[in-house]
Image (cartoon, rainbow, N blue to C red):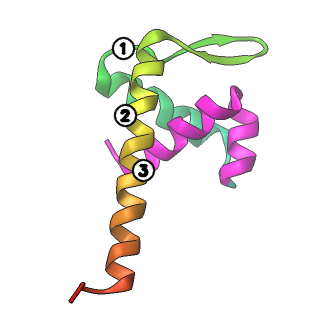
Amino acid sequence: MSLAQIRYFVAVAEEGNVGRAARRLRVAQPPLSRHIRSLEDELGTPLFDRTPRGMTLLPSGELFLSHAKRILEAVDDACAAVRRGPSE
């Protein structure tokens, strides 16, 4: 699982639509869809209910979303800490 997959998952979950998430992330829609499918395959469970109108989170997706947001926040915090330098 990559950070990119986690970022993509969060964007799709927040947008509720792969097309809108692709625009937000500035990536093409087909690779974004492939990353989401790959993530679901790796986790062994679907995360979204796919409908003609978009994608809604399943309970497994809701659970993963809370963890995914914390992971991305921790990565952002780590990057900011490194940029600030060591505390003295």
User: In the rendered image, which quarter is residue 43 located in?
Assistant: top left
Q: Nearer the observer, disc 1 or disc 2?
A: 2
Circle 3 sits in a helix, a strand or a loop, which is it?
helix
Q: Which mark is residue 64?
A: none
Q: Relative to 59, does residue 88 appear above or below in the rendering?
A: below
Q: Relative to 31, does residue 87 appear above or below in the rendering?
A: below
Q: Which residue is mark 3?
A: 72
Circle 1 sits in a helix, a strand or a loop, which is it?
loop
User: In the rendered image, which quarter is residue 41 located in?
Assistant: top left
* Foreground of the two, 60 or 23: 60
Q: Residues within 10 Å of mark 2 (few under 14, many from 20)?
A: few
How far across and how far down the image is residue 76, in percent? Answer: 42, 62
Answer yes or no: is residue 38 visible: no
Q: Which residue is mark 2?
A: 67
Magenta stretch?
A: 1-25
Q: Main secondary structure of the magenta part?
A: helix
Which tag, 3 or 1, sits closer to the chain's start?
Answer: 1
Q: Residues within 10 Å of mark 1 (few under 14, many from 20)?
A: few
Q: Is residue 54 left or right of residue 75?
A: right
Q: Amino acid at mark 3?
A: Leu
Inter-mark Cα distance, 3 to 2: 9 Å
At a point 20% along the width and 89% down the height, the residue shown is 88
At a point 79% along the width and 15% down the height, the residue shown is 53
Q: Residues within 10 Å of mark 3 (few under 14, many from 20)?
A: some
Q: Which residue is mark 1?
A: 45
Which tag, 3 or 2, sits closer to the chain's start?
Answer: 2
